[in-house]
Amino acid sequence: MATYRIVLFYGFTPVKDPTAMRLWQRELAERWDLTGRVIVSPHGINATLGGTVENLKRYVKTTKQYPGLEKIDVKWSAGTGADFPRLSVKERPELVAFGVPDEIKVTADGVVGGGEHLSPAQVNELVSERGEDVVFFDGRNAFEAQTGRFADAVVPDVRTTHDFVAEIESGKYDHLKDKAVVTYCTGGVRCEILSVVMKNRGFGEVYQIDGGIVRYGEAYGSKGHWKGSLYVFDQRGAVHFDEHSQSLGQCIVCGTTTDRFRNCADAACTTQRLGCEECVPGPGFADRCPECVAARDEWLQRV
Ligand SMILES: [Zn+2]
Ligand SMILES: [Zn+2]
């Protein structure tokens, strides 16, 4: 029996020919029967792939031969071989869609002008030294924070990464401009950009966590500043770092603790809501979410 794993990594380095890199990545992933998604941009690569251990090792070793990707931090986790329905390899203007491709400058050493990287241990040192002067800032889509987040974290009101720039420029977070702001996201890639965006807009002391929630959770489980489970977009749905970990999420129907995000009844809607096994046994809710109901009411009033 083969052993399956999932790898998650990103690397920021100048990519002169993203099309060539996309074709190369697709060729490697197909050669070794990997599924999942890879995004390539002029700034680098971001990948989440599943497959057998042997094949993933071959893929990672080969990918690391690309200049600037020698030092990528690859996160390994358990897989089933069926974690992703297919392979998607895409070329985009940005690795994460903040909508600021021209603001981001990348060298072989990574992103220029981002927040200082802290190891999980350094995060804890910062909090114990500076106390309430330190604020955790969630770099994910707001719904992801429903099941888990850092203690007392600020969770911006964003549906997608694209909303971040307007949210930060709104003035809502200006009181954090002289605080020590620790940005965090799943594996760290979103904070590489978010921290640049924040620093460029007047936030004086911005940090990011090396390897994101994944590395912090591996180091401290439920015994640090992270609370709850980690949302992941693949079939696993949620990751628990130890046996004491409990989701912060509640079923919207009955209130029981759950980290099961379910789809909206409207197939075109991307809203995810929490529904427990009993209330929402299938892949989605039977009804549509308030947001798409409201959008339709608005549309009906206009016609
Ligand atoms: Zn329920
Ligand atoms: Zn909906």
Image (cartoon, rainbow, N blue to C red):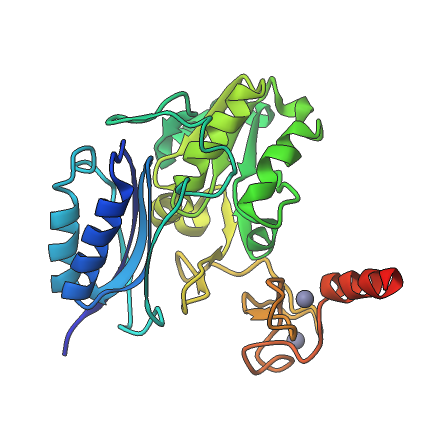
Q: Nearer the viewer, residue 82 or 270?
A: 270
Q: Is residue 149 left or right of residue 101?
A: right
| Residue 70 coordinates in the image, percent (x, y) | 16, 37
Q: Is residue 209 left or right of residue 100?
A: left
Name the residue at the front extreme. Answer: 303
| Residue 192 coordinates in the image, percent (x, y) | 41, 33
Residue at image location 41% in from the left, 40% down from the top? 93
Q: Is residue 4 visible?
A: yes
In the image, residue 146 sits, relative to residue 30, either above or below, namely above
| Residue 148 coordinates in the image, percent (x, y) | 54, 53
Looking at the image, how many numbered discs can be counted on the residues? 0
Q: Is residue 151 visible?
A: no
Q: Nearer the viewer, residue 44 or 290?
A: 44
Residue at image location 35% in from the left, 68% down from the top? 84
Residue at image location 62% in from the left, 72% down from the top? 275
Name the residue at the right extreme. Answer: 301
Q: Nearer the viewer, residue 120 or 234?
A: 234
The C terminus - image quarter: bottom right
Q: Nearer the viewer, residue 245 or 144?
A: 144
| Residue 177 coordinates in the image, percent (x, y) | 61, 20
Ligand 2 rendered quadrant: bottom right
The N terminus - image quarter: bottom left
Q: Is residue 167 left or right of residue 225?
A: right
Residue at image location 43% in from the left, 60% down from the top? 240
